[in-house]
Image (cartoon, rainbow, N blue to C red):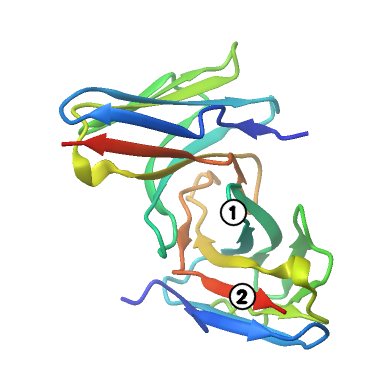
Amino acid sequence: DQQVKQNSPSLSVQEGRISILNCDYTNSMFDYFLWYKKYPAEGPTFLISISSIKDKNEDGRFTVFLNKSAKHLSLHIVPSQPGDSAVYFCAASTGRGGKSTFGDGTTLTVKP
Amino acid sequence: NAGVTQTPKFQVLKTGQSMTLQCAQDMNHEYMSWYRQDPGMGLRLIHYSVGAGITDQGEVPNGYNVSRSTTEDFPLRLLSAAPSQTSVYFCASSYRTMTGDNTEAFFGQGTRLTVV
């Protein structure tokens, strides 16, 4: 059973508009959530995170929202730029060890 | 500051061969992990380590061994390669805050492995 799900494999958005990427999880023990961005032939790079004690975290154009009761988080990118085109992975972790459970990713395409 | 370095970047193995994927980090991170990524899928955890001398299994450990003799290095050994192990392998490191909280992972550039 997949504990972290990203139900949209792809998303296409016009430059300047908002991109919203969604993620659902099933394990209520997860207490730390992260978004990573991945370009082809590169390793994932960290984008933004949120602790389970918060419901929102903002960093420049990127905002992550956490709804614990719904076991749902979302990443908002405003405004979207062509350079944001990449695969975005949602990840969740719990406890010690730094290990995370990843979703399957959403490919974001931002059209000029 | 090199971060997380993986070698080799590409490798082709024949079924039954063994090899070691190397991973080194220069950030003095406690935690290190190995993931594999198959097409259209997310990263799946193979093995991880919370410190030198301590390793544990992840979600998909079968066919792989690890050891952590130093803080810097975390090699992944394929014992007898199989076509099902064709994948992209990522090594990652992270640290724990003074309050014990997890933090983000730093990833290497990956090793693309093909088993024929």
Callout 2 environment at 10 Å: few (<14), some (14 to 19), or many (20+)? some
Q: Position of residue A22 (x, y in %)?
A: 47, 25
Q: Please tell me whether mark 2 sits on a helix, a strand or a loop.
A: strand
Identify residue for label 2: B113
Q: Quadrant of the C terminus of chain A?
A: top left
Query: Viewed as shown, does residue A102 lie left or right of A20?
Result: right
Q: Please tell me whether mark 1 sits on a helix, a strand or a loop.
A: loop
**Mark 1 vs mark 2: same chain?**
yes
Q: Position of residue A20 (x, y in %)?
A: 36, 23
Protein chain holding label 2: B
- Residue B68 lies, with reference to residue A8, above or below; the image says below
Residue at image coords 42%, 65%: A41
Query: Viewed as shown, does residue A77 lie left or right of B40?
Result: left
Identify residue for label 1: B39
Picture quadrant of residue A57? top left
Mark 1 and 2 residues: CB-CB less than 8 Å, in contact?
Answer: no
Query: Viewed as shown, does residue B54 lie left or right of B106?
Result: right
Q: Position of residue A108 (x, y in %)?
A: 36, 37
Given the image, on which type of amino acid does mark 2 rest?
Leu
Residue at image coords 58%, 39%: A103
Residue at image coords 52%, 63%: B93
Front residue (pair B85, B99) = B85
- Residue A29 lies, with reference to residue B10, above or below; the image says above
Q: Position of residue B10 (x, y in %)?
A: 52, 80
CA gap between label 1 and label 2 equals: 13 Å
Picture quadrant of residue B61? bottom right
